Image (spheres, helix red, strand yellow):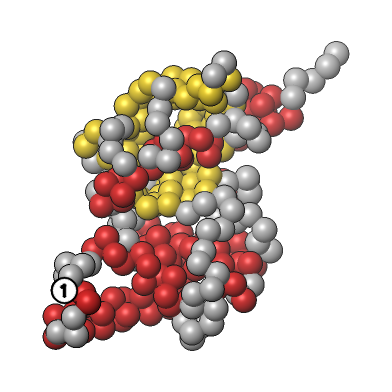
Amino acid sequence: MLEINGLSKFFGGVKALSEVSFAVAAGEILGLIGPNGAGKTTCFHLINGLLPPSAGRIRLAGRNMVDLPPYRRARLGLARTFQNVQLFGGMTVLENVLAGCHLRQQVGPLTALLPVPAVRRAQAENRKRCLELLELVGLGGKQDEPAETLAYGDQRRLEIARALAQQPRLLLLDEPAAGLNPRETEDLMALMEKLQTLGITLLVIEHDMTLVMGLCHRIVVLDHGEVIAAGAPREIRRDPRVVEAYLGREEE
């Protein structure tokens, strides 16, 4: 589903990513982990086009995306959430999810201004789908509440629902469990497993090792902008390079 080859990003003389390569198989849940400052979020910004790479290739289902703007990548089936929740606070929960439907809109912008049957049908279909997504993420019945009044965990789920409204093939989740309590994290893990069974491929940045080790099929570890390990959770847990990156080298 996703192929990253030799991906690098430099900010002046600062190396954020250097020769990063990995792949995500269709239907897989892949974890991207590493200490703070390892380059994880920078990697996401390069994948979805918020930053241009200094070098390297990015392919989604075989299509080269390096020169495509973010909206073109979204149309190819790429969606994401952010480390800091990015919602339209003054809009309702339902309106936030509806905002994610515009990429799949079947009527043109001029036609959408007219009260014609095709527009009414499209609006009804979008509303129905968005209400189903709210049920899926556990926000059923809250569609008319302002997004800014939701509890933090609900805002996290709302951002996921809005991303799902784009009908993605690949969903990038940037620290989705940040700030959640243990019960909310369990609910999030169940949701991510359900998304995977629905055919959505997941690439997840996360610091919660219970979630990463219990949910991800494979894990890629970054440290100082480079891949230091990749493999199954049981392999990553025992890798001395990973232990050193997180805990430091033991002194004599």
* Residue 162 visible here: yes
Q: Residue furthest right?
A: 252
Which picture quadrant has residue 225?
A: top right
Horizontal side, residue 79 vs residue 205: left or right:
left
| Residue of label 1 | 111
User: At 60% from the left edge and 61% from the top edge, which residue is drawn?
Assistant: 185
Tell me residue 108's x, y (percent). 17, 67
Q: How many marks can you see?
A: 1
Q: Is residue 245 above or below residue 129?
A: above
Tell me residue 21's x, y (percent). 40, 25
Tell me residue 138's x, y (percent). 50, 75
User: At 54% from the left edge and 73% from the top edge, which residue is drawn?
Assistant: 90
Horizontal side, residue 116 vs residue 75: left or right:
left
Along the line of sight, the residue nearer the viewer: 187 or 89: 89
Q: Label 1 sits on what residue type?
A: Thr
Horizontal side, residue 196 vs residue 81: left or right:
left
- Mark 1 is surrounded, within 10 Å at the Cα level, by few (under 14), some (14 to 19) or many (20 or more) other residues, namely few
User: At 14% from the left edge and 84% from the top edge, which residue is drawn?
Assistant: 116
- Quadrant of the image containing the N terminus: top left
Along the line of sight, the residue nearer the viewer: 217 or 115: 115
Tell me residue 135's x, y (percent). 43, 78
Q: Residue furthest top?
A: 252
* Residue 22 visible here: no
Horizontal side, residue 239 vs residue 4: left or right:
right
**Mark 1 falls on what kind of element?**
helix
Q: Is residue 221 above or below residue 201?
A: above
- Quadrant of the image containing the C terminus: top right
User: At 18% from the left edge and 70% from the top edge, which residue is drawn?
Assistant: 110
Q: Is residue 203 above or below residue 114?
A: above
